[in-house]
């Protein structure tokens, strides 16, 4: 059997490609430059081809080196998954876990559930990243995240999702709005209502528009956050739809707004967990989502059953 490259040699090649010089790559992987250089030469001998062009200004991969680099990254990722899968089989939800969360969930959910989650899984170390769904999914595919809390429905290549609980939409408007005293609403009540919504890129925008399919978004105003959105409503610029999660967290407290629910079937969005297809942490991602839901206070008004949520990605 032919001699095979070692994971250490592949790690050195990846470091060299990322840092562009033997000295910086050696520093990044905590070895001396001669050690790294010798390992790369041995890797070239094993593979029978030159992988690196060495010059005074640094090191660059040859075309063969680029091919090997792509496969080396895959091999290293699979090796990391092997370790993670073994650890998870022994004791799931322990150690570092990189979790992404979208901006319309993170500030309203995490402060309430993280303390309980730490108590429930004291060996779990959660690293958080807040970002828009598309960028979180890119990070999942690149293995920079283990899972993400997102709003569903949302389909993307190489991403799998599972809905965990439902979050209904509430209609928020100034107290002198025509619908302020309506009690409960139906989506048809918003047919001629131009809504204030978040700017493009936020999935909440499309999910909100899907509730009132004959309605529209204000084209002259768009908010970058839910906090800005409610300030716009308070200023009399219009009405909007808000997730109950944010309202229950105090988003509209002391704002003097009218906040109205919808008649059943409840309109809203699904809160779910997403992970990279084939990830060794898929089961842990689902367990984490369930643990977060279980850590919600008994008085939370989030639902077990699905809300009426149409539409696709947003």
Image: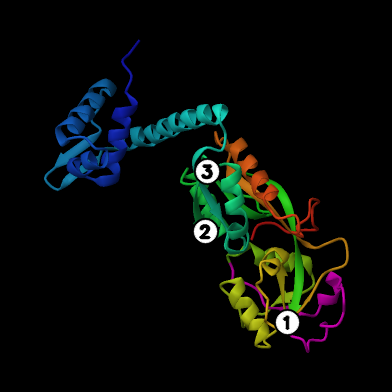
**Rendered-image quadrant of the C terminus:** bottom right
Which residue is disc 3 drawn over? 146
Give x and y (percent) for residue 20. Answer: 23, 45
Nearer the observer, disc 3 or disc 1? 1
Residue 216 higher or lower than 174, as above or below: above
Evaluate whether residue 158 shows in this view.
no
| Foreground of the two, 152 or 247 | 247
Highlighted range, magenta: 173-200
Residue 211, by quadrant, is: bottom right
Residue at the left extreme of this rendering = 56
Sequence-wise first label, 3 or 1: 3
Helix, strand or loop for disc 1? loop
Give x and y (percent) for residue 11. Answer: 32, 33
Residue 303 located left or right of residue 148: right
Q: Residue at the location (26% across, 26% down)?
A: 43
Which residue is disc 1 drawn over? 257
Are discs 3 and 1 less than 8 Å apart at CB?
no
Sequence-wise first label, 1 or 2: 2
**Rendered-image quadrant of the N terminus:** top left
- Badge count: 3
Which mark identifies residue 25? none
Helix, strand or loop for disc 3? loop
Does the magenta run of residues contain 85? no
Give x and y (percent) for residue 161. Answer: 65, 45
Residue 1 higher or lower than 308, as above or below: above
Q: Residue at the location (41% across, 30% down)?
A: 75
Evaluate whether residue 49 shows in this view.
yes
Q: Residue at the location (86% across, 73% down)?
A: 185
Q: Main secondary structure of the magenta part?
A: loop
Residue 286 located left or right of residue 13: right
Which residue is disc 2 drawn over? 130
Nearer the observer, disc 1 or disc 2? 1
């Amino acid at each position: 059997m032919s001699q095979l490259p070692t994971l250490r040699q592949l790690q050195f090649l990846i470091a060299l490609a990322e840092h562009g010089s033997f000295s910086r790559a050696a520093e990044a992987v905590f070895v001396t430059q001669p050690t790294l250089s010798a390992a790369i030469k041995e890797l070239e001998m094993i593979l029978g081809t030159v992988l690196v062009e060495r010059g005074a200004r640094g090191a660059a991969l040859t075309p063969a080196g680029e091919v090997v680099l792509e496969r080396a990254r895959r091999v290293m990722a699979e090796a990391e998954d092997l370790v993670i899968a073994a650890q998870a089989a022994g004791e799931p939800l322990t150690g570092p876990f990189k979790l992404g969360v979208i901006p319309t969930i993170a500030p309203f959910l995490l402060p309430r559930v993280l303390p309980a989650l730490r108590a429930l899984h004291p060996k779990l170390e959660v690293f958080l990243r807040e970002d828009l769904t598309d960028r979180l999914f890119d990070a999942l595919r690149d293995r920079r995240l283990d899972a993400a809390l997102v709003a569903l429905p949302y389909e993307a290549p190489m991403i799998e999702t599972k809905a965990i609980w439902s979050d209904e939409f509430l209609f928020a408007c100034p107290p002198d709005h025509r619908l302020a005293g309506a009690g409960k609403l139906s989506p048809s009540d918003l047919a001629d209502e131009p809504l204030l919504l978040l700017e493009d890129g936020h999935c909440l925008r499309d999910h909100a528009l899907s509730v009132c399919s004959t309605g529209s978004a204000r084209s002259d105003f768009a908010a970058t956050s839910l906090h800005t959105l409610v300030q716009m409503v308070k200023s009399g610029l219009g009405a909007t739809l808000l997730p109950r999660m944010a309202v229950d967290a105090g988003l509209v407290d002391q704002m003097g707004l009218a906040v109205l629910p919808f008649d059943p079937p409840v309109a809203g969005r699904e809160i779910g967990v997403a992970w990279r297809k084939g990830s060794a942490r898929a089961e842990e991602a689902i367990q984490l989502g369930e643990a977060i839901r279980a850590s919600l206070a008994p008085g939370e008004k989030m639902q077990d059953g699905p809300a009426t949520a149409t539409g696709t990605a947003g």
